[in-house]
Image: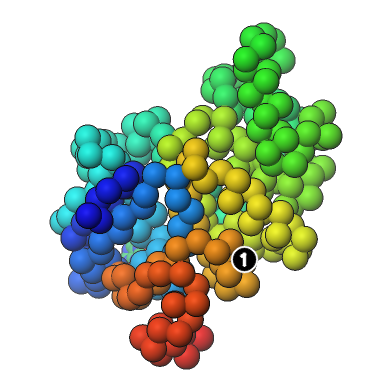
């Protein structure tokens, strides 16, 4: 049964922009706690798919569910974020003038004013949670460092940490390693792997070395449809996939 332990599913999803079919009868099943890579050439529909999951774009037809009870097509973008779908865009958007600690605190408490973080008192459990996430993202020794002084890679991890503070069931991550050094890429692979089990993670990525290194199930999108799905060696030997990537 394809729906066994499925956290997110898209079935028969279609989306047309001005007569152009960006998403074409798309079926996608993401299981509880799995890490999934989505690859595909430019224009394959990866961004549109992410936009549909987060409610930014409405499909013309099809089903989008979180678990068996939550129909995401009945919710708006803010509601979808609140029920536990976090999205990280390619460019990190941390508060550069706040410390690592305060960035995480802000993400957790959702204080309306940035000034609120300097007055808020956290209980022990909240402080432990910030410590736990700081260790997970490898920034435990930089709690008081201004986020603006972090490296590009560290900013990306901090933003993942900020999403984790909201305890998402599903994390959508867009090209996390763009602009990273090899060492930072390895560290990011470790980080994303360490999130599985507790969270489901969907990563859209162009860097094939990185996709290979995280060793997850890979879904290849092409013309808005799933062209192939499987482990990286199956994908690489798939003739249909080779044909699509030949021109790249
Ligand atoms: P990918 O992220 O895989 O590169 P996209 O989802 O961005 O692919 O785009 C899929 C196709 O849909 C592209 O041909 C793109 O031009 C088109 N498209 C995406 N969004 C819009 C939009 N808002 N209006 C018109 N066309 C769009």
Asked if the beta carbon under badge 1 is closer than 8 A to the nearest atom of ligand 1, the reply is no
Task: State whether residue 86 appears in this view.
Answer: no
Depth check: give the residue in front, 139 or 119.
139
* Residue at (67, 29) in percent of width and height: 132
The percent coordinates of residue 22 (x first, y second) are 29, 68
Q: Residue furthest left?
A: 61
145 is higher (above) or lower (below) than 63: above
- So how many labels did they put on this image? 1
The image quarter in which residue 143 lies: top right
The percent coordinates of residue 81 (x first, y second) are 40, 35
Question: Is 150 on the left or on the right of 31, as rendered?
Answer: right
73 is higher (above) or lower (below) than 234: above
Q: Secondary structure at mark 1?
A: helix
* Residue at (57, 30) in percent of width and height: 165
The image quarter in which residue 164 lies: top right
184 is higher (above) or lower (below) than 107: below
The percent coordinates of residue 21 (x first, y second) are 24, 71
The residue to which callout 1 is attached is 213
Depth check: give the residue in front, 187 or 52.
187
**Regarding ligand 1, which quadrant of the image does it lie in?**
bottom left
């Amino acid at each position: 049964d394809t729906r066994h332990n499925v956290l997110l599913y898209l079935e028969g999803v279609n989306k047309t922009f001005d007569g152009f079919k960006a998403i074409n009868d798309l079926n996608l099943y993401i299981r509880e706690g799995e890490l999934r890579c989505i690859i595909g050439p430019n224009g394959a529909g990866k961004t549109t798919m992410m936009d549909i999951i987060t409610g930014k774009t409405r499909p013309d037809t099809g089903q989008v569910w979180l678990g068996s009870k939550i129909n995401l097509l009945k919710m708006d973008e803010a509601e979808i974020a609140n029920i536990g779908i976090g999205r990280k865009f390619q460019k990190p958007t941390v508060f550069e003038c706040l410390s690592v600690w305060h960035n995480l605190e802000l993400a957790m408490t959702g204080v309306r004013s940035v000034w609120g973080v300097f007055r808020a008192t956290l209980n022990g459990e909240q402080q432990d949670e910030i410590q736990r996430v700081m260790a997970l993202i490898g920034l435990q020794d930089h709690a008081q460092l201004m986020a603006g002084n972090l490296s590009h890679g560290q900013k990306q991890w901090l933003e993942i940490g900020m999403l984790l503070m909201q305890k998402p069931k599903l994390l959508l991550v867009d090209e996390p390693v763009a602009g990273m050094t090899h060492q930072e890429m390895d560290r990011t692979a470790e980080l994303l792997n360490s999130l599985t089990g507790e969270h489901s993670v969907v990563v859209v990525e162009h860097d094939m070395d990185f996709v290979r290194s995280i060793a997850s199930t890979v879904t290849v999108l092409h013309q808005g449809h799933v062209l192939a799905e499987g482990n990286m060696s199956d994908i690489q030997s798939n003739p249909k996939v080779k044909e699509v990537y030949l021109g790249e």
